[in-house]
Every structure is written in structure tokens, then in C-alpha cells.
Image (cartoon, grey):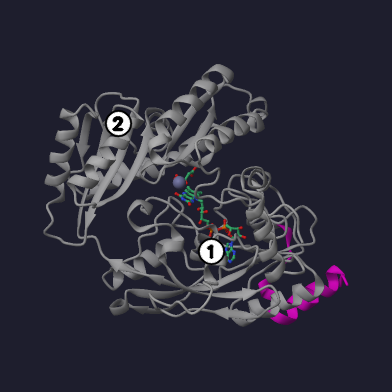
């Protein structure tokens, strides 16, 4: 039986649970929460709810479950797939985790910390550093995204090659289920084989199965020696060979290996103040690579320099600049992390977040870029990203002066070509950004039917009334 309530009754219920100040209904106050970072969607909401405790989240979900009100969890709202934006009905609520932002425990001896979902990622990195430990998750949005959002999207970022995705850094989770029960697996154990690994279900679920309220996370020894280089490689195949050479030569100390095309250097130097070309000449492809070690005595600069010399002798690269100090290293990274912003300033872009077996990346880029050059004269390819993970942001920008609406009208056609090609290489059409609302149809198109059926079974079991982030990830609400 459906239990519909009027907006007035619902708002009274929310105010009873949270107090009036934590229930936003004023349009201006709600506005930043009703659209996504890329401005792809503009939603409406009954209210933005700002609970201050796990108990309040539990009471809210029990209430919404009973009254069949859709709940859209929202972290830092930096996601790329519209997952944190409510639909246009005005019947859903946004549940902001911003006030759950405490580090509950930090245990340097156990290399772990327990943080609430609303903690900003950069703050957690600093908390770890303060006790001489390292939390390796790192993304361009780390100053605003929250750990709850990172886990709900299973974020990747700049250090996956060495430390894995967000999922790999989790020891336990606290989750409020759709009916208001609290599942707590917040232990700080590295070994625990007692039954199904339930926490894994909520990682990467994009708020469709429950609300993550806290996480127990792994810490690592702090890197004490770091060597960073900006390298002009002779193409993508050469970059892959260089990665293998560096892994061998450094005893697997490569922590980042990012591909950057010349157009990205051009866009960042043009649009972002203070960014300069790292190398004197102009080359089509670069990598930003970093070796790191927790042993201060490791001579990583010498190791990297010698490996790059071998790679140059072997014809893999044309030039390289080794960061001579922390300032230069930061400048290389600033360039890399500014690419999305520079692209945004340049104009509309069609984004594709794809992963392929690393050995197939070069052929994929060649075939896809040939298609784009032949079919989209208004487009400039800006393909960059986490080459070490086989993950490219295969983005296509409009050439300056192109009519934005005409350009964006190509989005579906380009996506089909790019994604079909990715699938033919055995790749993924969402490497690290998730499905959200944007790629719901893509998931159905490319995932095996049994996988979709199992996802729907899980959704029905955990959220029988379909209140958790309706319309995201899975096409049909149960
Ligand atoms: P939101 O955008 O608020 O939410 C994302 C999804 O998670 C939504 O479906 C939402 O409903 C759900 N959600 C949020 N919090 C919770 C919770 N506590 N419980 C349950 N569900 C929840 N991503 C990468 O993977 N790698 C990158 O390198 C990267 N770089 C980026 C660079 C820039 C400049 C920007 C703007 C974004 C980048 N992103 C990247 C995308 C984005 O930052 C990540 O997806 C991030 O993990 C989202 O976190 P958030 O807190 O902003 O989540
Ligand atoms: C990145 O790696 O910079 C992001 O994941 C991609 C983007 O912001 O487009
Ligand atoms: Zn990325």
C-alpha cells in the first residue's frame, strides 16, 4: 500500500526530527543542492535536510520509508553523473551529510581512522598527516568532496596504481538502511571472514541502497621520498612501455602515472593563472609520473633519472623535466589537476570516463580519434587521465567559436561510437565516475543481463519501497 503524505505533513515530520533550522525549504538556500557540478541537471526538492547525528539520519529514513518519499543523499556535490541531484518532481528530499563531519577515532598504531561521512577528503588527508600517517585517496575535487561521496562513488583519482580505489581503503562502514536500521561494521580489522562482506554492497552504490554515515579507513606509512617528472613520451604505446620500465627499475615504487596531451597543456596555460609549460619544446603527449617511498633514504630522484635516461635511449621519450623541489612538483600537479577546469572554461565538452586493458589503450585512442577527426570537424580531442590504471578521460571539446548547442547535439552519437569501441576492446564505460542518472541507459546496454537482474534483486531486498535515490544507477525503481 502506498502511503502518500502532503508536503505540509512531511515538512512537519522533518522539523519534528531535526528542528526547523536543519530543514531548508527556501529556494535560494536550496539552490546549490538542486543542480550538479556539471550543470547537466536542474532538480527540485521538498526540502534539503541537514541531520547532525546518525540517529537523526535513521529517523529521517524511517519516516521517508513510511511515507514513500524519495531520498537523495548528497556529499560535496562534485559528482559527474548527476547522482546527487533530485529529480524535477519536487517530491524528493536532498539529505546533506555536511554536518556529520567528525573524525571519531584515529589510531596510528593500527594504521586506521574512523571518520563520519561528511568529512572533506582533504581534511582527512591532513588528519592522517598530523599523526605521521598517509591517507592516499587523492582527487582534483579533494577540497570539496566528502569521504561518504568518495565511497558511494568508489572514487579513483591520482594514486590508484599504487593504493587502489576508494573501496580498497575501507575496513568497515556504518550505514543507515532504507527502513532506518543502522548497520555497523565499523571495526578496524584487516581480517574478518564472518559471512558475506555486506559493506562492499554500499561502496559504489551511489546512495541507492542506504546512507553511509561513517567509515573505518586504512592509513599507510607516509611517503618520505618522492620523485616526480614531466615527460614527453613518443605516443601512448611508448607511455605504457615507460610505465613498465619504471615499475621494474624502481622496485614497483610508481604511485602515479598520468597521461596529458599537448592540448591540455595549452588549455591550462591559457585559462589557469600561474601555469607554465613544463618543457621547452612542444610534444603531442606527456606523462606526469611519480615514484614514492616511505623510506627517506631511498634515492628516488637518481633512480627516476637513470630510468628515464634508459627510456630515452630506448626511444620511448623525447624530453623530461625532473621536479627539483616541492614548488616544481606542485606546479606539475597543479597543471594536471587543472585540466577539468581549463576544459570547462574553454567551452562545452563531451566526457567519457573509460577503462581498458592497458595494452589496448593506444589502439583504442587511435581508432576513436580517427573517427572524431573524420566526423566532427568542430571538435578537439582532450584525452587524458590515469593511464597507469588503464583509465582515460576521453573528452571531446568544442573548437573555439563553435555554437555550443550545435556541438552538444552530437553527444549521443559520439558516446555511442566511443562506448561501443570501448566495449569491443573489453573495457568499461564508467571507470571511476559512476552511473548516477547520466549513464543509467549505458549500464543496461553494456552490462550482462544477469548482472542487472542481481543488482535489481539486491535493490529490492535492501530498499523494497524504492526510496533510496530513485532513478539513479538502475533504470526501473522496484
Ligand atoms: P556527491 O557528488 O555529493 O555524490 C555522489 C554520489 O554519491 C551521489 O549518487 C550521492 O547520492 C551519493 N552519496 C554522497 N554521499 C553519500 C553518503 N554519505 N551515503 C550514500 N550516498 C552518498 N572522481 C574520481 O573518481 N577521480 C577523479 O580523479 C576525480 N576528479 C575530479 C576532479 C574535479 C575537479 C571534480 C569536480 C570532480 C572529480 N571527480 C573525480 C568526481 C567526484 O569528485 C567524485 O565522484 C567524488 O567521489 C564525489 O564525492 P562527493 O562528496 O562530491 O559526492
Ligand atoms: C580527473 O581525473 O581529472 C577527473 O576524474 C576527470 C575530470 O574532471 O573530467
Ligand atoms: Zn579522473
Q: Which residues are magenta?
A: 1-27
Q: CA distance from mark 1 to mark 2?
A: 35 Å
Mark 2 packing: few (<14 Cα in 10 Å), some, or many (20+)? some
Q: Which type of secondary structure does the marked residue at label 1 adopt?
A: loop
Q: Nearer the viewer, residue 18 or 360?
A: 360
Q: Which dot marks residue 238?
A: 2
Residue 27 appears in the picture as rendered: yes
Is residue 156 toward the left or the right of residue 313 in the image? right
Q: Which dot marks residue 203?
A: 1
* Residue 416 in picture, x, y percent from top left: 62, 33
Q: Nearer the viewer, residue 360 or 20?
A: 360
- Quarter of the image with the N terminus is bottom right
Is residue 3 toward the left or the right of residue 345 in the image? right
- Residue at (51, 72) in percent of width and height: 197
Q: Which type of secondary structure does the marked residue at label 2 adopt?
A: helix
Q: Is 127 located above or below residue 478 in the figure?
A: below
* Residue 132 in picture, x, y percent from top left: 26, 70
Is residue 45 toward the left or the right of residue 393 in the image? right
- Residue at (65, 46) in percent of width and height: 438
> Is residue 17 within the magenta segment?
yes
Whether tag 1 and tag 2 are in contact, CB under 8 A, the answer is no
> Is residue 181 within the magenta segment?
no
Residue 348 appears in the picture as rendered: no
* Residue 279 in picture, x, y percent from top left: 25, 30
Amino acid at each position: 500500500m502506498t502511503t502518500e503524505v502532503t508536503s505540509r505533513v512531511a515538512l512537519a515530520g522533518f522539523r519534528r526530527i531535526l528542528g526547523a533550522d536543519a530543514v531548508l525549504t527556501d529556494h535560494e538556500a536550496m539552490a546549490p543542492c538542486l543542480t550538479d557540478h556539471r550543470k547537466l541537471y536542474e532538480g527540485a526538492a521538498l526540502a534539503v535536510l541537514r541531520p547532525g547525528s546518525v540517529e537523526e539520519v535513521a529517523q529521517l529514513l524511517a519516516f521517508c520509508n513510511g511515507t514513500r518519499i524519495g531520498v537523495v543523499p548528497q556529499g560535496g556535490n562534485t559528482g559527474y553523473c548527476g547522482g546527487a541531484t533530485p529529480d524535477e518532481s519536487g517530491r524528493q528530499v536532498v539529505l546533506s551529510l555536511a554536518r556529520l563531519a567528525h573524525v571519531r577515532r584515529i589510531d596510528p598504531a593500527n594504521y586506521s581512522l574512523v571518520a563520519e561521512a561528511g568529512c572533506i577528503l582533504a581534511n582527512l588527508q591532513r588528519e592522517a598527516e598530523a599523526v605521521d600517517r598517509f591517507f592516499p585517496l587523492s582527487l582534483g575535487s579533494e577540497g570539496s568532496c566528502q569521504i561518504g561521496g568518495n565511497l558511494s562513488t568508489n572514487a579513483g583519482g591520482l594514486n590508484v596504481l599504487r593504493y587502489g580505489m576508494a573501496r580498497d581503503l575501507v575496513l568497515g562502514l556504518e550505514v543507515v538502511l532504507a527502513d532506518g536500521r543502522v548497520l555497523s561494521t565499523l571495526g578496524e580489522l584487516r581480517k574478518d571472514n564472518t559471512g558475506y562482506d555486506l559493506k562492499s554492497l554500499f561502496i559504489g552504490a551511489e546512495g541507492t541502497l542506504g546512507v553511509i554515515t561513517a567509515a573505518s579507513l586504512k592509513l599507510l606509512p607516509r611517503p618520505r621520498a618522492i620523485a616526480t617528472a614531466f615527460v614527453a613520451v613518443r605516443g601512448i604505446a611508448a607511455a605504457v612501455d615507460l610505465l613498465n620500465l619504471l615499475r621494474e627499475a624502481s622496485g614497483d615504487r610508481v604511485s602515479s602515472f598520468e597521461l596529458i596531451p599537448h592540448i591540455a597543456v595549452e588549455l591550462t596555460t591559457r585559462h589557469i593563472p600561474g601555469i607554465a609549460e613544463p618543457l621547452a619544446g612542444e610534444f603531442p603527449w606527456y606523462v606526469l609520473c611519480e615514484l614514492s617511498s616511505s623510506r627517506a633514504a631511498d634515492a628516488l630522484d637518481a633512480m627516476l633519472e637513470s630510468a628515464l635516461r634508459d627510456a630515452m635511449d630506448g626511444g620511448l621519450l623525447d624530453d623530461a623535466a625532473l621536479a627539483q623541489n616541492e614548488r616544481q612538483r606542485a606546479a606539475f600537479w597543479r597543471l594536471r589537476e587543472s585540466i577539468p577546469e581549463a576544459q570547462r572554461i574553454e567551452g562545452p565538452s563531451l566526457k567519457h570516463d573509460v577503462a581498458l586493458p592497458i595494452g589496448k589503450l593506444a589502439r583504442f585512442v587511435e581508432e576513436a580519434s580517427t573517427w572524431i577527426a573524420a566526423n566532427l570537424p568542430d571538435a578537439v580531442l582532450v584525452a587524458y587521465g590515469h593511464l597507469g590504471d588503464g583509465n582515460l578521460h576521453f573528452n571531446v571539446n568544442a573548437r573555439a567559436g563553435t555554437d555550443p548547442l550545435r556541438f552538444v547535439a552530437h553527444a549521443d552519437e559520439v558516446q555511442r561510437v566511443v562506448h561501443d569501441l570501448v566495449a569491443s576492446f573489453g573495457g568499461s564505460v564508467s571507470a571511476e565516475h559512476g552511473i548516477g542518472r547520466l549513464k543509467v541507459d549505458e549500464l543496461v546496454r553494456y552490462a550482462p543481463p544477469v548482472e542487472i537482474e542481481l543488482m535489481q534483486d539486491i535493490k529490492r531486498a535492501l530498499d523494497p519501497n524504492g526510496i533510496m535515490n530513485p532513478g539513479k544507477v538502475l533504470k526501473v525503481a522496484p
